[in-house]
Image (cartoon, rainbow, N blue to C red):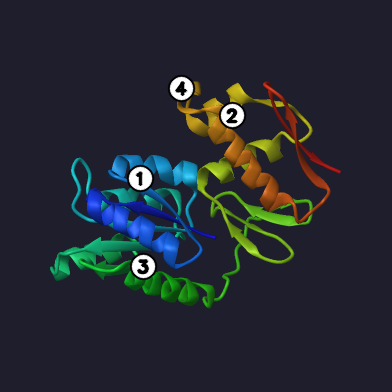
Amino acid sequence: MIKILLVEDDEVLGYIIKEGMELISDYEVCWANTPKDGLKDFDEFMPDIVVSDVEMPGMTGLEMVKLIREKNQNIPIILETCVSSSKVILEAYQIGIDNYIKKPFLPEELHAYIQGLLKRLANKPIKTFENFTNIGDLKFNVKQQFLITPTKKIELSIRESVLLDLLFKNQGQLITKETIAEQVWGGTQYLNNQSLDVFMHNLRKYLSEDPNIKIKTLRGVGYILEIL
């Protein structure tokens, strides 16, 4: 399943892309009508790829991409545009898009763009990095936001990285939901239990390649990272 975050304010086009992509292949599409909603969904939905329009009310697609790139340098981003200006396209590449598709387009065209982009990125050599933290048999880099397991490299979102770092630095100790809300989300008013459950589910999945690493839940209270 490839998770797509679609940011598109055109109701007709957004519906066509979402329904079309989910019929074409194994895609799950989260559709946001505004960049503001798109940024919220980026954190909660944790997509594999972002597809966004350029001209939208309140905030442009380029402004949103800049904010996404501050959180994640690696997620593939495709920009939809009806603009032929080389200045706009150049700016888009400078802030970090991977490709752009010209409107109007069919879902089949977007599918081809995505498959080509993911194939190209999959063939890129994995760089070597320093400043690893060993978590059991896994290697963790909080600044560059990834885990290396015995079988693969996992790109993390900035919140996943900060949350895992908080749990690891306090391994064996209870980390309350209030502490997580303050240190990872910036305040209890910005965190809901459902969102936290999703993040914990994903961290458990990432860490599952080392059976000696467990995240224990104290229901209604918080979490403990245990390394046996």
Is 103 above or below relative to 37?
below
Kindly identify the residue that appears in the image at 60 percent across and 63 percent down.
129
Eye-nearest disc, 1 or 4: 1
Quadrant position of residue 100: bottom left
Q: Which residue does the numbered mark 1 point to in the structure image? A: 38
Proximity of marks 1 and 4: CB atoms separated by less than 8 Å? no
Left or right side of 115 for 172: right
Proximity of marks 4 and 3: CB atoms separated by less than 8 Å? no
Q: Residues within 10 Å of mark 3 (few under 14, many from 20)?
A: some
Q: Residue 196 in the image: x percent, y percent?
A: 58, 34
The answer to which of marks 1 and 3 sits earlier in the sequence is: 1
Disc 1 marks a residue whose amino acid type is: Gly
Left or right side of 55 for 8: right
At mark 3, the secondary structure is loop
Q: What numbered label is drawn on residue 189? A: 4
Work out how far the residue at label 1 is from the one at label 3, CA to CA, in angstroms: 18 Å
Q: What numbered label is drawn on residue 98? A: 3
Work out how far the residue at label 4 is from the one at label 3, CA to CA, in angstroms: 34 Å
Disc 2 marks a residue whose amino acid type is: Ile
Q: Which residue does the numbered mark 2 point to in the structure image? A: 180
Q: Residues within 10 Å of mark 2 (few under 14, many from 20)?
A: many
The answer to which of marks 2 and 1 sits earlier in the sequence is: 1
